[in-house]
Every structure is written in C-alpha cells, then in structure tokens.
Image: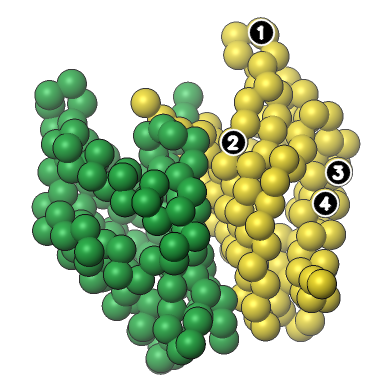
Chain colours: A green, B yellow
Amino acid sequence: MHSTDHIEIETIIKNWVIAIQKRDIAGILANHSENIIMYDVPPPFQSVGIEEYKNTWEQSFFNGTESGVYKVLEMTIEAGIDIAYCFGILQCSWNNNGVFEDIKFRLTIGLKKLNGKWIIFHEHHSIPSN
Amino acid sequence: MHSTDHIEIETIIKNWVIAIQKRDIAGILANHSENIIMYDVPPPFQSVGIEEYKNTWEQSFFNGTESGVYKVLEMTIEAGIDIAYCFGILQCSWNNNGVFEDIKFRLTIGLKKLNGKWIIFHEHHSIPSN
C-alpha cells in the first residue's frame, strides 16, 4: 500500500515523461523549482536554475532526440514527510551521428514538499563512462 | 543554523571520504544498507547490494586510483525527518592508461533514517558523456 506522497510523486514523474514525449516545455517544467540543479547525460557538467534546465530540453529536441520513446523502465520512490528521492532506469532514443539508437540511462531525482506540493529540486541523469 | 540531521549526514559523508582516502573498506561501508543500489562512473550500469558495492571499491583500488586525493568540492544536503538526499561535486584521481589525472564528477546520495541512524541506500556517481 503506497502513501499519498508516493502516489503524488509517481504522478509527477508520469506527467513529466508524457510532457517530454510531447515536447511540451511548460509541462516538463510544471513541478520544478526555479533553483533546480541538474546533472545531465551530455555536457555541460551541471545546469543551474530553471532557465539552464529548460535549455537542455530545447537542445535535446533540437538535436532530434526521438522524444516519443522516452520512458521509465523501473523507478524506486522514497517519500518522507517533506523530502523525497527517486532513482531508476529510463530509456530514450539518441541521435548518434544521424542514426537513432535506444539507450538506457540512470536517473536520480530529489524533491522537497513546499506548501503541500512536491517540487523537483535536483535531477541526475547519466550513463556509465569508460 | 543546520539541523542535527544535517550535521549527522555531513559527518557520515566526511567519514566516508576519509575511509576512501585510507582504503578502509569497513569504514567505507559503515553507514550503508545491505540493499544499496549504486550507479557508478565506470561500468557496470548498476551495482545492486552491498557486496557489489564493495566490489566496485576493491576494483577501484586495484586499478590504482589515487584514493588519497578523493575529496568533496561542494555538497548540498536536504535532510527531512526520515528521508534525505545530497548532491554535489567531488574530485578524484583516475588512472588513464598509466597516467593519473584529476577528474571532477557528480555525486547524488539517497538516505533513510532507520532506528535513529541515517543509512545510505543509493549513490549515483557520474561524469558527462559525449
């Protein structure tokens, strides 16, 4: 039996993924803090604040990522009273020199509850590096 | 003014880094769950459970990482009542075909408080990937 907080966070992630699939920037940002710090798969090393976070998505769409296949394969949610984190494995399609390839990547998310609403303050996306 | 929880977690991370510098495996594992899931900089894609987590450190030391320079450059700690996460930038020295190079990497940590003690259940280490 999952808590209300668990279900709320699950819904936020579900809606975020749907927004990515639709390339709906407003939907992608709907539950994010102005002060988000994001570590992405490609450079830069980090994106600080909502504008830089937004730019990574616009860049990703411009690069021709096939956003329609963006999906969550597995996700663990640890929701407390006012702090939560999630981690799991996602899949997207990546434009590798003109050829789209499905890749799996790792994602960790950090959230805080403000005025009764869960907000994403941190995202860490990566693949292993040789 | 930081909360007691904030200070406790800060101390856990500080002691974990000291243990890495000393190659002290027991110290590295001192505040980790049996069920930790770790995403590391090098492959594998994920390490599940404390044995696999431990193996990544033994492998790292075997590979000749200069653990003495492992250090935290910056770290944000978000501690709730029973769930916490941290993220920041660390530095280590990496054996790149026989030449040691300082590299910066991103780290996110997820913790749960069990019986009054903060335990690490998740770590995500990465560098950007081109």
Circle 2: residue type? Phe
| Residue B74 in the image, given as x and y percentages of width and height | 70, 46
Q: Residues within 10 Å of mark 4 (few under 14, many from 20)?
A: few
**Between residues B85 and B57, which one lies in front from this camera angle?**
B85
Tag 4 residue? B14
Tag 2 residue? B105
- In the image, residue B35 above or below residue B104: below
Q: Are marks 2 and 1 on the same chain?
A: yes
Furthest-top residue in view? B98
**Which quadrant holds residue A98?**
top left
Q: The numbered mark 4 sits on a residue in which chain?
A: B
Q: Nearer the viewer, mark 1 or mark 3?
A: 3
Tag 3 residue? B18
- In the image, residue B19 above or below residue B112: above
Q: The numbered mark 2 sits on a residue in which chain?
A: B
| Residue A49 in the image, given as x and y percentages of width and height | 46, 53
Q: Earlier in the sequence, mark 4 or mark 1?
A: 4
Q: Earlier in the sequence, mark 1 or mark 3?
A: 3
Measure the alpha-carbon separation of dots 2 and 3: 17 Å
Measure the alpha-carbon separation of dots 4 and 1: 29 Å
Tag 1 residue? B98
Determine contact: label 4, label 3, CB under 8 Å: yes
Q: Earlier in the sequence, mark 2 or mark 1?
A: 1
**Which quadrant holds residue A22?**
bottom left
Q: Are marks 4 and 1 on the same chain?
A: yes
What is the secondary structure assignment of the residue under circle 4? helix
